[in-house]
Image (cartoon, rainbow, N blue to C red):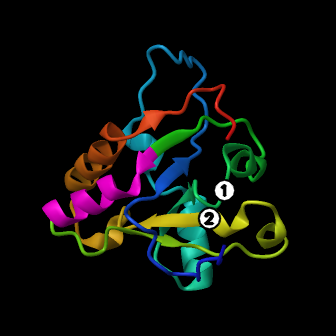
């Protein structure tokens, strides 16, 4: 399997894994992804500035990265939220947001040598630089979260 190049678009058919922190009062029966789970973190923003790239919210293309591999990149336990990249592309088309897209995002050494590193990607267009108001950005994040689902905790594939 060929490894994707940095900045290459992730196919719309890809299933994306997002690993937000588990809330203190986590109850899998009642928990749903929220806009907060897709907000760019300060780390996302700082890396973008340092690398001269757009802000990218970290996700993993499940075609290249298993759930366990994605979790191995996190220091703390995390939930696994799944969203179809096609849903993000659909939102981008519907709202005419050219900046909203998912691209592969190469990791720096030594992380780039770890199993599953090839599947690291980032959702662009979720930060302040897109020209959306704070309310519009929140609505966008809520739309994405509304199309996401919590992965069954027993699924390790």
Name the residue carrying label 2: 120
Q: Eyeballing the image, is 101 above or below 85?
A: below
Residue at 22 percent across and 69 percent down: it is 97
Task: Decide: few, some or many residues near mark 1? Use Cα within 10 Å; few <14, some 14-19, many ≥20.
Answer: many
Which circle marks residue 102 in the picture?
none
Camera-side mark, 1 or 2: 1
Work out whether mark 1 precedes mark 2 in sequence or the reverse, and give the earlier one. 1
Residue stretch in magenta: 83-95
Q: Position of residue 148 (x, y in %)?
A: 39, 40
Q: Is residue 86 left or right of residue 9?
A: left
Q: Position of residue 43 (x, y in %)?
A: 61, 61
Q: Are marks 1 and 2 in contact (CB under 8 Å)?
A: yes
Query: Does the magenta run of residues contain 82?
Result: no
Picture quarter with the N terminus? bottom right
Q: Determine whether the residue tagged by mark 2 lies in a helix, strand or loop.
A: strand
Task: Decide: few, some or many residues near mark 2? Use Cα within 10 Å; few <14, some 14-19, many ≥20.
Answer: many
Q: Main secondary structure of the magenta part?
A: helix
Front position in the image: 33 or 4: 4
Name the residue carrying label 1: 65
Residue at 32 percent across and 41 percent down: it is 147
Residue at 54 percent across and 33 percent down: it is 151
CA gap between label 1 and label 2 equals 8 Å
Q: Is residue 113 left or right of residue 65?
A: right
Q: Position of residue 132 (x, y in %)?
A: 22, 64
């Amino acid at each position: 399997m060929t490894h994707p190049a940095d900045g290459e678009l992730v196919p719309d058919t890809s299933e994306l894994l997002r690993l937000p922190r588990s809330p203190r009062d986590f109850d899998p029966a009642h928990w749903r992804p929220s806009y907060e789970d897709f907000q760019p973190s300060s780390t996302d923003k700082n890396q973008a500035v340092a690398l001269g790239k757009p802000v990218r919210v970290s996700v993993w293309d499940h075609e290249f990265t298993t759930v366990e591999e994605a979790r191995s990149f996190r220091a703390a336990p995390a939930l696994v939220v799944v969203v179809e990249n096609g849903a993000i592309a659909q939102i981008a088309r519907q709202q005419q947001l050219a900046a909203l897209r998912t691209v592969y995002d190469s990791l720096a050494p030594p992380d780039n040598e770890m199993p599953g590193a090839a599947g690291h990607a980032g959702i662009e267009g979720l930060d302040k630089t897109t020209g959306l108001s704070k309310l519009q950005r929140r609505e966008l994040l809520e739309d994405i979260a509304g199309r996401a689902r919590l992965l069954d905790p027993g699924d390790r594939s």
